[in-house]
Image: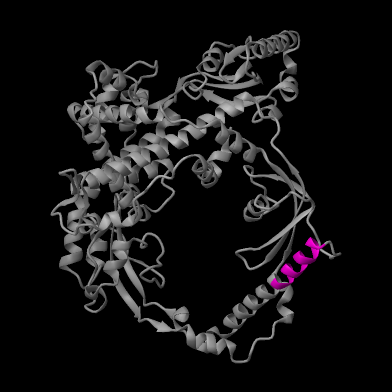
């Protein structure tokens, strides 16, 4: 409900700083205290963070990111210094907090641990009950024993106790809540006019030698890095899957033995009418009475539910759509369990009596029902064939990988033997540089090998490099261009255009500031203003760029109309006119409470960060940079 807090985190931090002393944080120099460390990447209060522990944590974080974005990113991009430092930082923080929790005498009762494990959604069956087979299956997939998993869970629960102690004591003062509420609800009627550099190009007269002078003074801008074209051979699980045929009997056997895997849970299409509640018993009674009256009306005319939602519902997200909430499955409405319980008791077309939740009173209508089912065999066939082929290809990949690497190394003057081994033809790239290559060659380790002395000068194959899980590549340079500088004649036209646009941008800003001064003095100025639009801090606007909206809320609107101007990143000068400023409206106790909870969460995180920073000061934290940067 309050995207404003998320979108304006910087503003929130400034507001909090008005009330609280700023926290002290540590800079990047914390990572460069020590360059030793053997096979550990860090030492925290006398205990080491091993290379193995760090690599496992990094791999888990990379896999979590890939799952979250459904694999829509090159895995090579996830092995970067920023992610490695962030992963290590989380391990260091975890060690510091665990050390503090144990030192404070915090413990986790055996009953609490068992209850927490039983509550893990991943271990629940179709009926919502804890399933030991699912628990065992998870442990096997993660390569963990029950002892290892329970030890990790125990640590998590200890850290949760410590964290809750700080989160529970976080407090957002009413002055801060009121100020942020006022800021988030502000509206301004805004028009703008853009003076683009192209409008002033005709006025630009470049000195005849300007382009050559710039070229000579900035030779680095026109340098072309060394480039190569390569042949390369790919060994991948995906390519091995292409030639695998799964017998129909195997597909059917897998389906019969894994019925649970193909279950589709019950889903319900729902709509609702929300009557929100203000603070106080009397207001609550009025809201209940209104909801009950609506319920009586809808009992007489159920078909009017959508129209009633448009007219009466106080849920801005669904009211315009007739109260439609889309498709809901068990667990999706866990924040309002009363709503979910009522919805899953309804029959199609039925409307519930008023249901009270923390948001107010709901009238819920079940518009459609998709019962739980098991996918029929024919629907699941393709999915099973792909899974079985992937398993076979995975085993084949493991068998071929070592041989592939050996052939690439032992017959380093040609890629043909390696291509023959995996039954494929070498592929050929376009021109690539150390910093720019097409997938799947855009892997830092592979590019370093391609541009190495051994590969460039000695004309040898690169080693076989795993650029992603299940994807190995070996390459060989077939053509090389050394670093060079583009000749002046080749870049002259583009450079002259760039310099002209830069000068035109200066003229646009100069004219814009002249017009702005005239507007502020009340002098008549002919300007093609855009139609006025009402904008707010927390809502995106397609017609007006976000930097312009942000600038509008920094303007002094004591006297209207108010005028201002700014230079855009594209070099244009933008004039702004605010003709109306509105204070926040419709501030309900529920909105205030929700915002207060969000600010409380922000403050709790900031307080926890400060606490961790103080622990780093008190404890001994040493980072071994060489080991951290080592690619496994």
Residue 386: image quadrant is top left
Give the main secondary structure of the magenta stretch: helix
Find residue 212 and report its horizontal and vertical position in percent: 54, 89
Residue 58, can we see it? yes
Q: Is 36 on the left-hand or right-hand side of 500?
A: left
Q: Which residues are the magenta region? A: 510-521
Give the quadrant of the C terminus.
bottom left
For image coordinates 38% across by 71% down, the residue present is 433
Residue 520: image quadrant is bottom right
Residue 487, can we see it? no
Find residue 263 and report its horizontal and vertical position in percent: 42, 24
Residue at the left extreme of this rendering: 38
Q: Is 288 drawn above or below residue 136 in the view shown?
A: above
Residue at the bottom extreme of this rendering: 208
Q: From the viewer's side, name the closer residue of 493 and 315.
A: 315
Give the quadrant of the N terminus.
top right
Q: Is 301 on the left-hand or right-hand side of 622?
A: right
Q: From the viewer's side, name the closer residue of 587 and 86.
A: 587
Assess whether residue 152 is covered by the magenta stretch.
no
For image coordinates 26% across by 34% down, the residue present is 141
Residue at the right extreme of this rendering: 524
Find residue 116 and report its horizontal and vertical position in percent: 31, 21
Q: From the viewer's side, name the closer residue of 616 and 144.
A: 616
Residue 220: image quadrant is bottom left
Q: Is 37 on the left-hand or right-hand side of 521?
A: left
For image coordinates 23% across by 61% down, the residue present is 464
Q: Is 373 drawn above or below residue 52 in the view shown?
A: above
Assess whether residue 512 is covered by the magenta stretch.
yes
Count all numbered tags in the image, as a single digit: 0
Find residue 491 and report its horizontal and vertical position in percent: 54, 83
Q: From the viewer's side, name the closer residue of 63 and 152.
A: 152
């Amino acid at each position: 409900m309050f995207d404003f807090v998320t979108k304006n985190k910087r503003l929130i931090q400034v507001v909090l700083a008005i009330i609280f002393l700023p926290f002290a944080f540590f800079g990047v120099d914390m990572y460069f205290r020590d360059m030793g460390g053997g096979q550990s990447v860090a030492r925290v209060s006398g205990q080491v963070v091993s290379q193995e522990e760090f690599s496992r944590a990094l791999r888990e974080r990379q896999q979590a990111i890939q799952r979250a974005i459904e694999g829509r990113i090159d895995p090579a991009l996830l092995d970067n210094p920023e992610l490695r430092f962030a992963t290590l930082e989380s391990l260091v923080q975890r060690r510091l907090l665990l050390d503090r929790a144990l030192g404070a005498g915090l413990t986790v009762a055996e009953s609490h641990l068992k209850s927490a494990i039983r509550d893990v959604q991943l271990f629940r069956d179709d009926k919502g009950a804890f399933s030991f087979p699912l628990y065992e299956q998870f442990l096997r997939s993660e390569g963990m024993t029950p002892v290892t998993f329970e030890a990790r869970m125990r640590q998590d629960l200890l850290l949760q106790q410590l964290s809750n102690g700080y989160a529970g004591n976080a407090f957002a003062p009413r002055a801060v809540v009121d100020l942020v509420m006022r800021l988030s609800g502000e509206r301004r009627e805004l028009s703008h006019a853009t003076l683009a550099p192209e409008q002033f190009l005709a006025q630009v007269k470049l000195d005849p030698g300007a382009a050559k002078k710039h070229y000579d003074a900035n030779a680095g801008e026109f340098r072309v890095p060394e480039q190569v074209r390569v042949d390369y051979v790919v060994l991948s699980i995906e390519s091995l899957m292409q030639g695998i045929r799964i017998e129909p009997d195997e597909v059917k056997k897998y389906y019969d033995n894994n019925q649970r895997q193909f279950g589709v849970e019950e889903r319900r299409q729902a709509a609702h009418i929300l009557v929100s509640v203000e603070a106080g018993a009397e207001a609550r009674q009025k809201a209940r009475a209104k909801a009950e009256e609506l319920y009586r009306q809808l009992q007489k005319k159920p078909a009017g539910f959508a129209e009633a939602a448009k007219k009466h519902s106080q849920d801005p997200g669904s009211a315009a759509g007739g109260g439609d909430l889309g498709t809901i499955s068990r667990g999706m409405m866990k924040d309002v369990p009363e709503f979910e319980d009522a919805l899953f008791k309804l029959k199609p077309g039925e409307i519930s009596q008023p249901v009270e939740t923390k948001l107010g009173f709901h009238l819920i209508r079940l518009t459609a029902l998709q019962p739980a089912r098991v996918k029929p065999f024919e629907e699941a066939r393709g999915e099973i064939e792909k899974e079985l082929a992937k398993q076979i290809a995975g085993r084949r990949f493991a068998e071929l990988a070592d041989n592939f690497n050996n052939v690439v190394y032992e017959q380093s003057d040609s890629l043909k033997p390696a291509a023959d081994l995996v039954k494929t033809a070498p592929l050929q790239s376009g021109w690539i540089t150390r910093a720019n290559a097409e997938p799947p060659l855009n892997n830092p380790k592979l590019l370093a090998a391609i541009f190495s002395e051994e590969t460039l000068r000695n004309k040898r194959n690169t080693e076989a490099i795993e650029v992603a899980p299940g994807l190995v590549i070996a390459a060989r340079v077939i053509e090389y261009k050394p670093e060079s500088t583009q000749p002046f004649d080749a870049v002259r036209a583009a450079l002259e255009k760039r310099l002209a646009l830069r000068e035109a941008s200066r003229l646009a800003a100069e004219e814009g500031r002249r017009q702005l001064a005239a507007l502020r003095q009340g002098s008549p100025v002919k300007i093609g203003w855009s139609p006025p639009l009402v904008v707010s801090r927390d809502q995106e606007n397609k017609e007006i760029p976000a930097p312009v909206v942000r600038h509008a809320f920094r303007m002094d609107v004591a006297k209207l109309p108010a005028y201002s101007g700014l230079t855009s990143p594209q070099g244009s000068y933008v004039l702004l006119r605010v003709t109306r400023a509105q204070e926040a409206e419709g501030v309900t106790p529920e909105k205030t409470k929700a915002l207060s909870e969000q600010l409380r969460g922000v403050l709790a995180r900031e307080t926890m960060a400060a606490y961790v920073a103080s622990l780093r000061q008190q404890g001994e934290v040493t980072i071994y940079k060489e080991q951290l940067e080592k690619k496994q």
